[in-house]
Image (tube, grey):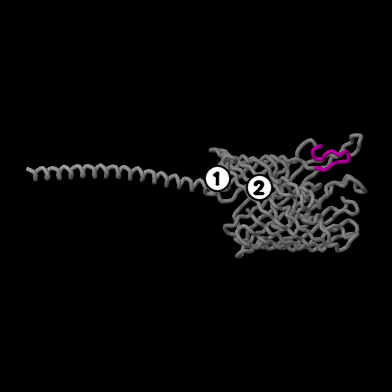
């Protein structure tokens, strides 16, 4: 009787132990599942935290509310220039013409500046099915001020409405002139202005239409109403504003394949406007025309050689950086003469080869001698050659050697050899 009881007791203990082990096992499995969920949640939170502290993500999150939904791109460069001239140059930091050497022959000078450093912003959007919108703002530091306290100068500030399917666009704001649109590649800031390359920047509203050819190439038609930039007349009023209407600019160009797949462009452009000078306190006015006819040509010879050239003729071109900075003679023997001039430039771009690219060119502005008084500038010529060397993807070092000769009515012709170097950090 005792043995069955003992055996029954042992079986009962075994069942209780099994049940307890099973219960413990279920509790452990439940706890392990809960711990696994917590670990997975912590790992997910950690990954999200890593993304949040990533510099690029942080920058993007910080910029998006500030820049709204538009695509905004910043660009520009920091530029340091140093230049030596064997004779005094106007204005020193960049060359316009050689000052008269009549009072002081071979008065050499040395200049350093960072004023050409440039900052810009391109804005794109919103875009629709038919029309795209964009804009641009750009400044540098050549507005004036002392050499270590330069002031901002607006270069571009415009909006653009573009209908790509119709190949038509409208630009409103300040940007480059329609006329003579090409620029030679120079280290010197003035890109041959006042010495054969005319055209600048001014407020305008411009319409552009392109017409394609079935055989390739296209015709471009551009027209603009631009602000007439004048100068203070004797009474202190602005002669361009006083004319009472804008200046008209226009250009027609044709682009066609030449030299195989290379496309050449030839353009014919011109402008016409008036300036009004209040010549006396009695209210008598004097009106002067400003006009030009211009031809531009771009010809790629091969992948690494391109030729560009422009020629012009016109009168009263000081606001367009022609006439060697002379527009109307307002006093002296030739009082109220509109100063006529003609000239142009040609340049070749070579390269790149490895990390180097080269540019050479010559430019000249020839003023009508009979339109200026004694001491007036009658001819300005420059010859230049330069090399740009890439130190890395963002940084260039450039060297330029140029020869300048400026003639005057009467004695005092000037001649200078200019050596210039620049460091350019692009972004």
Residue at the far bottom in the pictured view: 354
Q: Residue 195, position in %: x, y?
A: 78, 55
183 inside magenta stretch: no
Q: In the rendering, at what x and y percent does residue 391 appear?
A: 63, 62
Which residue lies most toward the right here? 333
Left or right: 286, with 156 as reference point: right
State the image coordinates of residue 237 (x, y, percent, origin top left): 84, 38
Q: Is residue 166 visible?
A: no
Q: Secondary structure at mark 2?
A: strand
Residue that label 2 marks = 120
> Quarter-wise, where is residue 164 in the image?
top right
- The residue stretch that appears in magenta: 230-242
Q: Nearer the viewer, residue 66 or 296?
A: 66
**Left or right side of 360 for 127:** left
Q: Secondary structure at mark 1?
A: helix
Give how far apart the Cα atoms at labels 1 and 2 are: 20 Å
Residue underneath mark 1: 60
- Which tag, 1 or 2, sits closer to the chain's start? 1
Residue 87 placement: quadrant: bottom right
Main secondary-structure element of the magenta-colored stretch: loop
Image quadrant in which the N terminus is located: top left
Q: Determine whether 133 is above or below 357 in the image.
A: above
Q: Is residue 421 left or right of residue 47?
A: right
Q: Is residue 30 visible?
A: yes
Magenta segment includes 241: yes
Which-is-in-front pick, marks 1 and 2? 1
Residue at 65% in and 63% down: 389
Residue at 37%, 43% (x, y): give it: 37
Image location of residue 350, percent across then percent down: 65, 62
Dots 1, 2 in contact, CB < 8 A? no
């Amino acid at each position: 009787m005792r043995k069955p009881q003992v055996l029954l007791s042992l079986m009962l203990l075994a069942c209780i132990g099994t049940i307890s082990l099973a219960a413990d096992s279920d509790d452990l499995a439940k706890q392990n599942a809960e711990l696994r969920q917590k670990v997975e949640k912590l790992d997910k939170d950690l990954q999200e935290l890593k993304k949040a502290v990533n510099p690029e993500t942080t920058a993007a999150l910080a910029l998006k509310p500030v820049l709204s939904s538009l695509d905004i791109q910043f660009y520009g460069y920091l530029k340091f220039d140093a230049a030596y001239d064997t004779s005094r140059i106007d204005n020193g930091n960049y060359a316009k013409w050689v000052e008269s050497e009549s009072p002081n022959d071979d008065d050499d000078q040395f200049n350093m500046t960072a004023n050409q450093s440039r900052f810009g912003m391109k804005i794109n959007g919103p875009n629709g099915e038919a029309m795209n919108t964009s804009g641009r703002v750009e400044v540098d530091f050549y507005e004036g001020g002392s050499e270590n306290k330069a002031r901002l100068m607006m270069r571009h500030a415009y909006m653009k409405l573009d209908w790509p399917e119709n190949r038509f666009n409208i630009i409103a704001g300040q940007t480059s002139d329609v006329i003579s649109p090409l620029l030679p590649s120079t280290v010197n800031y003035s890109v041959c202005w006042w010495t054969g390359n005319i055209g600048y920047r001014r407020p305008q509203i411009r319409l552009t239409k392109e017409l394609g050819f079935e055989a390739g190439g296209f015709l471009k038609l551009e027209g603009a109403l631009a602000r007439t930039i004048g100068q203070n007349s004797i009474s202190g009023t602005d002669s361009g504003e006083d004319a009472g209407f804008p200046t008209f600019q226009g250009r027609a160009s044709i682009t066609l394949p030449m030299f195989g797949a290379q496309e050449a462009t030839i353009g014919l452009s011109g402008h016409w406007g008036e300036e009004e000078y209040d010549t006396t306190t009695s209210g008598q006015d004097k009106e002067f025309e400003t006009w030009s006819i211009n031809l531009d040509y771009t010809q790629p010879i091969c992948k690494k050689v391109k030729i560009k050239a422009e020629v012009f003729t016109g009168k009263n071109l000081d606001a367009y950086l022609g006439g060697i900075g002379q527009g109307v003679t307002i006093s002296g023997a030739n009082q109220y003469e509109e100063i006529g001039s003609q000239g142009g430039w040609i340049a070749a771009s070579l390269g790149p080869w490895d990390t180097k690219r080269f540019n050479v060119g010559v430019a000249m502005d020839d003023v009508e001698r009979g339109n200026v008084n004694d001491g007036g500038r009658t001819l300005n010529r420059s010859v230049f050659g330069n090399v740009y060397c890439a130190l890395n993807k963002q940084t260039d070092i450039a060297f330029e050697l140029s020869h300048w000769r400026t003639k005057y009515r009467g004695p005092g012709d000037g001649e200078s050899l200019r050596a210039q170097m620049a460091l350019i950090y692009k972004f």
